Image (spheres, helix red, strand yellow):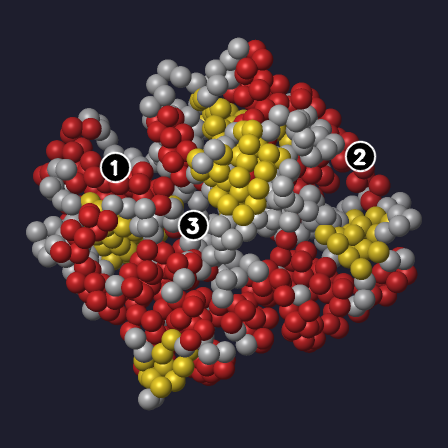
Amino acid sequence: MSPFDLLSEPIKRFVRDKRWDKFRPIQKAAIEKILSTDANYILASRTASGKTEAAFLPILSKVNFSENGVQVLYVSPLIALINDQFLRVEELCKYLDVTVVKWHGEANVSAKNNILKNPNGIVLITPESLEAMFVNRPSNLKHLFQNLKYLVIDEVHAFVGSARGVQLKSLLYRLKLVTGNHFRIVGLSATIGDFVEAKKITGEEENTVVLIDRAKKETEIHFKYFYTPGEDLTVDLLKDLYQECCNTKSLIFPNSRGRVEEVAVKLLKIAKIVGGHNNYFSHHSSVDKEVREYVEEFANNSRGQNYSIICTSTLELGIDIGSIDQVIQIDAAHSIASLIQRVGRSGRGEGRSGSLYLYATNEWSLIQSIACWELYNEGFIEPPVAIEYAYDTFVHQILSVLKSSSGKPLNDLVSEFKNNPAFRNVTEDELNTIVHHLLSQNIIESIGGELIIGVDGEKLVNNREFYSTFITDISFKVVYEGKRIGEIPLLPQVTVDENILLAAKVWKIKYVDLAAKRIEVVMANDGRKPIFIGKSPNVHHMIRQKMFEIICTHTEYTYLNAECKVEVANLRREFSIFKIQDCHTERPLLISDKYILLYAFTGSRITNSLAFLLQMVGLDVRIDGKNGAIQIEAAIDAFYEAWGRLSQTKNSVDTSLEAYIDSNPGSLDFSKWAKYLPLKYQVMVLKNQMHDFEGAFDFIAKMTLTLSN
């Protein structure tokens, strides 16, 4: 029997009306498997390969929507993606007369109320809104989801290896516990680097099957090099960029919001000078939601009009903006997974190839870009960092459980969490220790043998930020003539008379209202350089290793232009003085009059750990963000003496980290809930999420440091 024959009659009608003459590989496999088994599935295939339909065609064919209750729950990492997928799912469901409802902070309230009165159909939700339902509407959970058959997780890779993923895994377990219902889970992703970790998101990895379509889309690539000595992009780069994008539909990905705004403003300026179109837009999380939605709608309905959207990762995931001619990356993407997502946005449609232009502004960005592209072609995607000890998210879920239940005896709390797969590695003793620490801080209280939310805990759980596990910047609204144009994080450099870039325009700050979290601006016309806002990336060790291999070998790369080839040759010439024999077991050590440079060429987490160990033995160090080199302020003899002592620090790392956390309050800023843990567990969270000391000690044991001749 063919996959088409397996589908229900209404879904067959949908397929016929779409005039699909065949299913794509992932759709064929998913239809056959989902309809014939009760396993959980992870569907992995490239961007625009039809994964949404691969999940929903068989699910909608299998589920009986005449039964009471919500039958399918779709979970997405982004509200914008929910809004986008809503239209696709709603179109499918018209053939079944099934209700589809968006449930998030910006969704229609009456639609939510209607589904509460008459639970049915399909609900699209974010993890944070599901968390809010546990906290604020616990009685509605069983009412809505007691008959749930399937839960679809879109963009699974956005959750795996993150606190948000731990939260989602916990919520799925709690949902099964509350409803008494064992629903099936189907995850979707274009970029998974570790299928074992991806399967764990279901909480039932032994009953989770991965269906993979490994086919790659042909991609035409062009690498360009424009040396940029300062912070601003050069005029030559911008002119070349304008020529490449002015007659196309392009997505342009710089690596920071500040750079996004710089490119948008300057491309618009060039367009005005030469009489080109003015369809250059910025799109990132600081731009007002209505402005972002306008940009997405414009792109989707542009038809014959060309445009360029300069964006961050907000358009990296699967939001539909129509057919894109090309993707342009300015400087290296921070990860191969990110590069794959971005490249996949171009050349959508059967038989169409993608198109990628990469502009490098310094030699290390160029080498990293080559490394990412080569690893991608070798089939490598960074595996997520497994969060083995999610103590910080554990604190959050303890508060959530106590709030939703209005209190629990300690034994009941222990019983609930010891079976929760999200916290499989948390022992009963550790749970008790953490609970008593929360009691000592008045975050929870014990009354009549029951644990309840304490006075200070109420301030946490009643805050709208409680539902999320990720850190959000304290953002200030940016207002021009009474109209909101976006928001920016309030950093020390955001002051009166500074210029900022936002929504593809340059603004001057006239007033900062701290109480109202409001920044009033006027149009800037003084030519003053705007400030930039960005964060340091986390680079996987395989990318750094590949960068060193590129430098140590003589491989030619046909996709590089002449300037790129010259720069690669120059860098190879510079490093030839080290006479490296084996790029896997040797690392360059450069000695100058002022400092020593250790070119570690390893991942950010290992580099962080090496730097910390060097500080433990008394050396003054800093890390170069461009290439991960460690700069050491020491004479060579002192360095070698200290390097020889690093292996002896293994047993004192935790003690040193405790002292570091005590003296550096901002050291846990990456985690929203770690500060509520006992110090011992704060150390474990810091080690797990920001460091790799095991990798660092392995590096020390195996690597030979090679001086220049």
Which quarter of the figure has residue 128? bottom left
Comparing labels 2 and 3, the label whose residue is closer to the camera = 3
- Spatial CA distance of label 2 from label 1 is 55 Å
Image coords of residue 630 (percent x, y): 75, 53
The three-letter code of the residue at mark 2 reads Arg
- Residue that appears at 21% across and 39% down: 90
Could you tell which of marks 2 and 3 lies nearer the N-terminus? 3
Q: Is residue 221 visible?
A: yes
Could you tell which of marks 2 and 1 lies nearer the N-terminus? 1
Q: Is residue 80 above or below residue 65?
A: above
- Residue that appears at 34% across and 36% down: 49
- Spatial CA distance of label 1 from label 3 is 23 Å
Q: Nearer the viewer, residue 606 or 143?
A: 143
Q: Identify the element where label 3 is drawn.
A: helix
Q: Specify whether 37 is left or right of 570.
A: left
Q: Is residue 109 above or below residue 458?
A: above
Comparing labels 2 and 1, the label whose residue is closer to the camera = 1
Q: Is residue 328 above or below residue 455?
A: above
The three-letter code of the residue at mark 1 reads Leu
Q: Mark 3: few, some, or many residues within 10 Å (few <14, many ≥20)?
A: many
Q: Specify whether 38 is left or right of 51.
A: left
Residue with the mark numbered 3: 157
Pointer 2 with pointer 1, Cβ within 8 A: no
Residue with the mark numbered 2: 573
State the residue lying farthest toward the bottom: 448
- Residue that appears at 62% across and 19% down: 239
Q: Nearer the viewer, residue 21 or 617?
A: 617
Q: Specify whether 266 is left or right of 566.
A: left
Which quarter of the figure has residue 294? top left
Q: Which mark, by number, is residue 87?
A: 1
Pointer 1 with pointer 3, Cβ within 8 A: no
